[in-house]
Amino acid sequence: MIDLSNYTFVRSILFVKIEIPGQSVIRMSDYKTPLTVLGEEYDALGYFLGVTDTSSDLKITNSEVTITLNGVPNKSLAEFLAMPVKGSKVTVIRGLYDPKSEAMLAISGNPTGKFKGIINNYSIMDNQDGANASSTVTLICKSEVGMVAGRSAGRRTNPADEKLYFPSDLSMDRVPSLANAKINFGGV
Amino acid sequence: MSWWDDVKGAVGGVVDWFGEHKVASNILSTVVTGFALNKVQDSIASDSKSNSANAPARQRMDYGTTLNLPANQDNKVPVVYGTAVVPGIITEAVMSADRKKMTYVLTICEKTGTLGPSGADSVLTFEEIYIGKTKVAFQGDGITCASLTSEDGSVDTNINGLVKIWCYNNGVHHSTSPAGYNAATTYAYDWVPNWTFNHTMNNLVFAVVEVTYSRDKAFVGVPSMTFKIKNTLTQPGDVIYDYMTNTRYGASIPVSSINY
């Protein structure tokens, strides 16, 4: 637990790190100038970066976080869509700063982890504004707990499930006809 | 109706004459009625005797047993780590033409992955097989059931030769033996009628069971079978890794996302 009792004002800054496979790591913060946290420099997106609230729980939970990137130039969308965004690792940390000195508070536990997970889905919304048309990219992130909890339902004993994994296998094809079938065994 | 033919034959020649005389006609009516009743009683008695004579033959008629197989499309194939006793799920059943043999397939569990990212493949073995609460002992071939041993140690040999079990631990081409036996290597589609090499049972642990009907030995149905399965995938780290990465029954997390 971070002790802030000695501070009259503090500023919370969010740092988002996205690791897209095969691409350079994207680091950004909602602060107005670039900042270095834990030895890594985060670009300044200011109000263009939005991260939904999360709740603090005593036990780990299956929570989702939505990261919003506003003002993405339309000319950059094609590049974005070409990247394997889904499944990329996302780390969100929170740093507490002194708003006057703009220095990170030198207290234990700062910065602190807020969220770890992967990008589960994303959406793009066009903002048509003449020559300055831009888009809003929304990244829906699933937590690591959600990744484990969201396991496959498993294979069931029916042809559709079997062929989903092994399209040419005929082993389960007769299960529908056997279900509730009455078979005489031993009759003359 | 043979008794009525007798009636007609006996009185047919004189009935025309009596038709012209009322009193004689009444007498004839009474005589005919009495004769007819006697014939009916004789016929009933005759049928009764006939039934008694045929009774043993009818009792020997065996109409078999009507089975309602517990196949279900919503049964989930379980995953076994370590050792577990699991029931088989019927996913195929074929009756012989004379209805005396039934061959069916019991799907038992998923074949799991490797022991860690670069470890050996996991191996699932059939430690014990149970029919009801009794443990199956096999003949020397490791396939044909010889006896059943109950919890109190009593041995029942009625099953001897009536049930055959072929065990497979990773699809139709990977036969295995129950622990303590050495069964010959076989392909599952050699035992299941109508199966071909297109019946693959990929990544499944299963058993092919052939049961022979025997009214004399009170073996007239599909026995309830459970299998004690042992998986070499037992270490917690390996299990969690398999669970996290497997795309069929796990969380499908990319291997690159896991620090093993």
Image (cartoon, coloured by chain):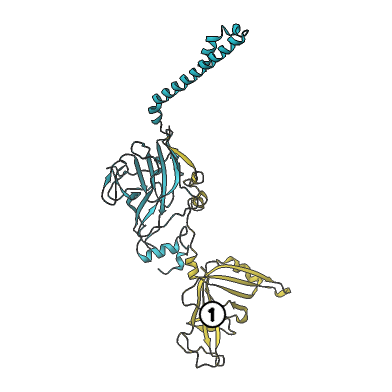
Chain colours: A yellow, B cyan
- Where is residue B67 shown, x and y percent of the image? 44, 42
Q: Residue furthest right?
A: A130
Q: How many marks?
A: 1
Q: Residue furthest front?
A: B23
Q: In the image, is B35 to the left or to the right of B140?
A: right
The quadrant of the image that shows the C terminus of chain B is: bottom left
Say which quarter of the image contains residue A185.
top left
Say which quarter of the image contains residue B117.
bottom left
- Where is residue A180 shown, x and y percent of the image? 50, 45
Residue B200 visible, this orientation: no
- Where is residue B27 shown, x and y percent of the image? 56, 12
A178 or A42: nearer the eye?
A: A178
Identify the element where label 1 is drawn: strand
- Residue at left offset 49%, top offset 67%: A147
A73 or A62: nearer the eye?
A: A62
- Residue at left offset 52%, top offset 90%: A103
Q: Is residue A137 above or below residue B155?
A: below
Residue B246 visible, this orientation: yes
Amino acid on which disc 1 is placed = Phe
Q: In the image, is B140 to the left or to the right of B167?
A: left
A134 or A109: nearer the eye?
A: A109
B109 or B240: nearer the eye?
A: B109
Q: In the image, is B156 to the left or to the right of A88?
A: left
**Chain of the residue under label 1:** A
- Where is residue B217 shown, x and y percent of the image? 33, 38
Q: Which residue bears the numbered disc 1? A: A15
